[in-house]
Image (spheres, rainbow, N blue to C red):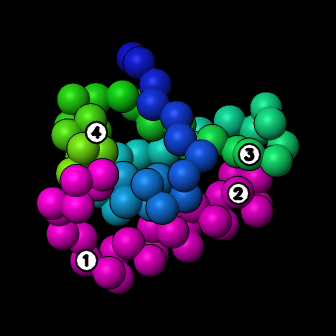
Amino acid sequence: MDQYKTSDLYLASYLFSKEHGIQGIDEENKQRKQFIFNNTEQLQLDKDKYWDGTDKVSPIKLFNAMKNLKNMIYNNV
């Protein structure tokens, strides 16, 4: 399956809060890690909603997603 990578923590948190699972973290560039997602049609739709500002997400879900992603980065999960 195709991969979608982003180093944008906010976008990654949004996608993670929308239940797009993280497939891994690309650490090739130590200064700019990238979150790896399966590049699905739904992910592309959600990404468009993020950039359009047309979606609503629970703040608790979003902040929990961001916290989990930061833990993945700092704990090398």
Identify the residue at horizontal 79%, vertical 32% (top origin).
28
N-term-proximal mark, 3 vs 1: 3
Q: Inspect the image, locate mark 1, and give the three-letter code of the amino acid beneath it.
A: Ser
Residue at mark 4: 43
- In depth, the one of 33 and 22 nearer the eye is 33
Q: Gap in Å between the C-alphas at discs 1 and 4?
A: 18 Å
Q: Gap in Å between the C-alphas at discs 3 and 4?
A: 22 Å
Any magenta on residue 35? no
> Is residue 23 shown to the viewer in this render?
no
Q: Inspect the image, locate mark 3, and give the three-letter code of the amino acid beneath it.
A: Arg
Quadrant housing residue 56: bottom left
Residue at mark 3: 32
Q: Nearer the viewer, mark 3 or mark 4?
A: 3
Q: Principal SS element in the magenta part? A: helix
Farthest front residue?
Answer: 52
Q: Residue 19: give x, y in percent of width and height.
A: 31, 54
Q: How many marks?
A: 4
N-term-proximal mark, 1 vs 2: 1
- Helix, strand or loop at mark 3: loop
Q: Gap in Å between the C-alphas at discs 1 and 2?
A: 23 Å
Residue range (magenta): 50-77
Q: Residue 66: give x, y in percent of width and height.
A: 51, 68
Q: Inspect the image, locate mark 2, and give the three-letter code of the amino acid beneath it.
A: Ile
Apparent side of residue 76 relative to residue 45 in the rendered image (left or right):
right
* Mark 3–mark 4 CB contact (< 8 Å): no
Residue at mark 1: 58
Q: In this view, does 1 lie above or below 12?
A: above
